């Protein structure tokens, strides 16, 4: 099959687009708060965060490339479809995509709106007027951009992302050169379990889940560019992944240091968005708030575009009777609706769900690299992912506040990672399983 080579400029555009897709709401609000709470233990917390918020998404993209986009091929059709649907709904209209609109409002728009907390009471429910209008406008833009996916590389990778990068570099330089406050003592889970707490914090970005989606989306974009050879697709996807991971690491490290040295600017803050806003307003005044609003708006917009596009393409393939454009409209409306639940509520609801599904996603990504070593690859993948799911459910129920004290004996259960050791043991056993003696009848 004839294939096209893309230019160095297009390769960087692809990498910048991938970076912009990942850099959304959670990527900006969680690191400053984690850095503030970790205090003197910031280094350990940051390493843990980088493992799940940079390392795993990078490995996820490479795994998708290695599997030629068919990362779930060894699972039963029903299980593969169910897992894919769950991931796309979580990362799309249920949690991640609506969160981009909420964070864009909280940090990017709210500081400029008078009476931003004014509400209407409709059917007994309090609706924030400004938030409702903003999210409708925000996801209206997302919908228009997603209706023309063939122009994603040009619109996002070559136009929006360079502006975003310039603003983020300016913010990072300010963290490096403006003296910060004295580093405080660690708080909450960062006192004794800074590394594992940082790892769990990395779940909140949802980027490992997103890497499975974005990997397939990037392969589709490469095909639209005429890159049809699987080896070339893998090569370009890996290059894009490295560019994106480098950018994410740079942003996270800067934001961790910002939170760690925020001092009194972080007092009373309930999330990293408040710390960011206070920091920028203190050091740069109104101009700084405008700059921060632009950064947050662009970051959230590009991520929302990637998420809605990927979801619409997936469900269009699953249900071809409904067109891609119709799914774009459906998901854009759904995101605007869910966004009006409120940021704090959305985060609290999403944590137990992430604790359940994330172990399965991580296991799926890692198993992709060793499937070739299994004598019985289908059985092995199914066993390992089943073990990850069962223990992930225990972690999820524990995070939801259900009394799970009977399982306290499990290694790493108190850290929210009960799934890790059993999944590793299952993988080790599968590596030594003999080939099946059954033959086809």
Image: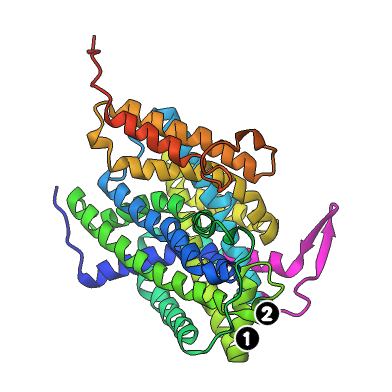
Q: Which residue is mark 1?
A: 281
Q: Residue 222 appears at what percent x and percent y?
A: 27, 57
* Crowding at mark 2 (Cα within 10 Å: few <14, some 14-19, many 20+): some
Q: How many marks?
A: 2
Q: Which residue is mark 2?
A: 111
Q: Residue 36 appears at what percent x and percent y?
A: 59, 71
Q: Depth check: 402 or 17 in front?
A: 402
Instruction: Kindly check if marks 1 and 2 are in contact, taking CB atoms under 8 A apart as contact.
Output: yes
Magenta-drawn stretch contains 113? yes
First in sequence, mark 1 or 2: give its number.
2
Q: Which residues are magenta?
A: 110-139
Left or right, 208 with reference to 294: left
Mark whose residue sits in front, 1 or 2: 1
Residue at figure coordinates x 51%, y 89% from the top left: 178
Q: Depth check: 35 or 302 in front?
A: 35
Q: Is residue 59 above or below residue 84?
A: below
* Crowding at mark 1 (Cα within 10 Å: few <14, some 14-19, many 20+): some
Disc 2 secondary structure class = helix
């Amino acid at each position: 099959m004839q294939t096209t080579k893309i230019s160095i400029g297009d390769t960087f555009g692809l990498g910048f687009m991938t970076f912009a897709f990942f850099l959304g709401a959670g990527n900006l609000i969680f690191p400053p708060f984690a850095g503030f709470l970790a205090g003197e233990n910031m280094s350990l917390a940051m390493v843990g965060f980088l493992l799940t918020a940079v390392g795993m998404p990078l490995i996820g993209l490479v795994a998708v490339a290695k599997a030629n986009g068919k990362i779930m091929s060894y699972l039963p059709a029903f299980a593969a479809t169910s897992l894919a649907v769950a991931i796309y709904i979580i990362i799309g209209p249920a949690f991640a995509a609506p969160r981009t609109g909420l964070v864009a409002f909280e940090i990017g728009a709210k500081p400029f709106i008078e009476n931003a907390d004014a509400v209407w009471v409709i059917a007994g429910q309090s609706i924030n007027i400004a938030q409702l209008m903003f999210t409708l406008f925000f996801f209206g833009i997302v919908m228009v951009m997603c209706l023309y996916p063939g122009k994603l590389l040009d619109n996002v990778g070559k136009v929006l992302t360079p502006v975003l990068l310039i603003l983020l570099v300016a913010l990072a330089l300010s963290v490096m050169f403006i003296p910060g406050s004295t580093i405080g003592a660690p708080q909450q889970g960062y006192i004794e379990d800074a590394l594992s707490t940082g790892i769990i914090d990395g779940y909140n970005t949802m980027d490992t889940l997103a890497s499975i989606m974005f990997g397939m989306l990037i392969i589709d974009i490469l095909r639209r560019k005429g890159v049809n050879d699987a080896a070339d697709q893998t090569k370009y996807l890996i290059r894009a992944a490295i560019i994106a991971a480098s950018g994410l690491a740079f942003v996270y490290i800067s934001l961790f240091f910002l939170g760690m040295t925020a001092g009194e600017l972080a007092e009373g803050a309930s999330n990293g968005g408040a710390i960011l806003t206070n920091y920028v307003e203190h050091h740069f005044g109104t101009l700084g708030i405008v700059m921060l609003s632009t950064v947050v708006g662009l970051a959230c917009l590009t991520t929302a575009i990637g998420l809605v596009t990927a979801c619409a393409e997936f469900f269009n393939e699953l249900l071809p009777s409904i067109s891609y454009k119709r799914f774009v409209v459906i998901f854009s409306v759904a995101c605007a609706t869910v966004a009006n639940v409120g940021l704090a509520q959305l985060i609290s609801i999403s944590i137990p769900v992430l604790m359940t599904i994330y172990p399965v996603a991580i296991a799926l990504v890692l198993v992709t690299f060793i499937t070739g070593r299994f004598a019985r690859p289908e059985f092995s993948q199914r066993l390992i992912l089943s073990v990850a799911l069962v223990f992930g459910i225990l972690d999820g129920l524990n995070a939801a506040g259900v009394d799970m004290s009977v399982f306290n004996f499990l290694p790493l259960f108190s850290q929210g990672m009960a799934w890790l050791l059993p999944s590793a043991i299952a993988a080790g056993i599968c590596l030594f399983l003999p080939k099946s003696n059954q033959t086809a009848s």
